[in-house]
Amino acid sequence: MASTITDVAKLAGVSAQTVSRTINTPELVSKKTLDKVQRAINALDYHPNITARLLVNNKARSIGLFMPFSSDQVKQSLFFSTLSAAICQFCSQNNLIMQMFTSMSREDSSQLFVKLFKERQVGGLILTCPSVSNEELIYLLSEKIPFIIVGRPGILTAQIPYVDVDNVKAGTIAVEHLIQFGHRRIGFLNGPSNMTLSIDLREGVTAISRSFPELEILEAETNLTLECGYIEALKLLQTENRPTAIFTADDLLAVGVKKAADELNLRIPEDLSVISGVQNGWGLILPYKLTHVDTQFEKLGDIAAQHMARYILNEEPINLSTLLEVRLVEGQSCGYVS
């Protein structure tokens, strides 16, 4: 059975209140008392309830991580697992707690976060995959809830801190790479239109298209799941004049493209080139090295956690508007037009 604060008090020969005061405000007790309590804690291997300590200190050393998707979608996303692992590791190293939330409803979640913050159960939020709609952000701002967004918000203002990768550039360099292989009819499996990620990728594709009037982009919007990638790729590849290459918003869609290509007896890259705009790890399960854009997910999580921790621990204002550079990582999934 785990030791209690009463056990520590009895062994140290002091009251439970003194033990609590020693743990929470050691600077206010004498060295003699501090030494006695510390020896008792060590002898009993006592671990104080961190949540109780935080309530006593009137602080919530807890970071809430919100993912606006169903639990099934989150399970399929290595983006979320990589991001949450980076944030969790940072929290562990800095005596912070990470809480994860998933929900399809941003509005309901925003109301929950306000409640949790006011009850001191979370000290701040890290939000992911922002939409073009900003109602939940405006609501959180009005309630003075501290947050950081991983991803570009729908509106850019100094009041909304965020960190993201340059997805516009990701879209440009991905299609530019296909153009260099002679592709002029390119399928584009993009994410949902309400995500700023999708908007930025489209902007990058449009930018490079202006320099190549003969370029034909066949865009399809879809959810970022393997099955959706398979269904949309199958539609594109069964058209009479099919694309010779497909650019996908992320790796998971690229895995869906591979499934569709196999079904139609199309070889990658001999018959079809494939490139992923957002590398999230799913490409590792493919039998070839997937050409992709490196988007530094671990760094995104680490930067967001660092800034939120500074706010929670030191009440430093969150001033963050950062775009990380991207780079193309050439694999074995792109080839010249046959």
Image (spheres, rainbow, N blue to C red):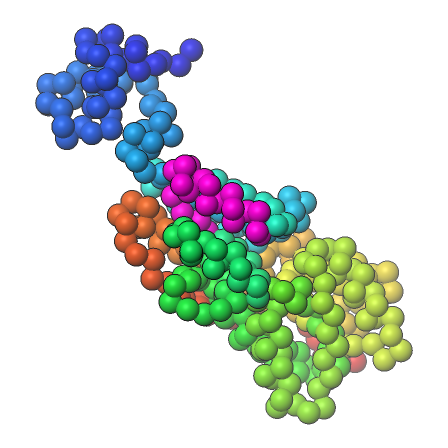
Quick one: 183 or 202, which is closer to the camera? Answer: 202
Q: Is residue 115 magenta?
A: yes
| Quadrant for the C terminus in the image | bottom right
**Residue at the spot 52% in from the left edge and 67% down from the top edge:** 154
- In magenta, the rendered stretch is 106-126
Image side of residue 303 versus residue 75, left or right:
left
Is residue 158 visible in the rendered structure shown here?
Answer: yes
Q: Residue furthest right?
A: 240
- Name which residue lies at 24% across and 28% down: 24
Question: Looking at the rendering, which quadrant does residue 163 occupy?
Answer: bottom left
| Residue at figure coordinates x 32%, y 18% from the top left | 46
On screen, residue 130 above or below 33? below
Residue 326 rendering spot, x and y as whole percentages: 50, 69
- x, y percent for residue 284: 63, 55
Query: Where in the figure is residue 316, as x and y percent of width and height?
Result: 28, 53
Q: Is residue 252 magenta?
A: no
Q: Quadrant of the rendered structure where residue 20 is? A: top left
Q: Position of residue 55 (x, y in %)?
A: 34, 31
Q: Is residue 154 left or right of residue 186?
A: left
- The number of discs equals 0
From the image, which quarter does the N terminus lie in? Answer: top left
210, above or below 133, in the image: below
Residue at (14%, 28%) from the top-left corner?
Answer: 28
- Residue 152's place in the image compared with 65, above or below, is below
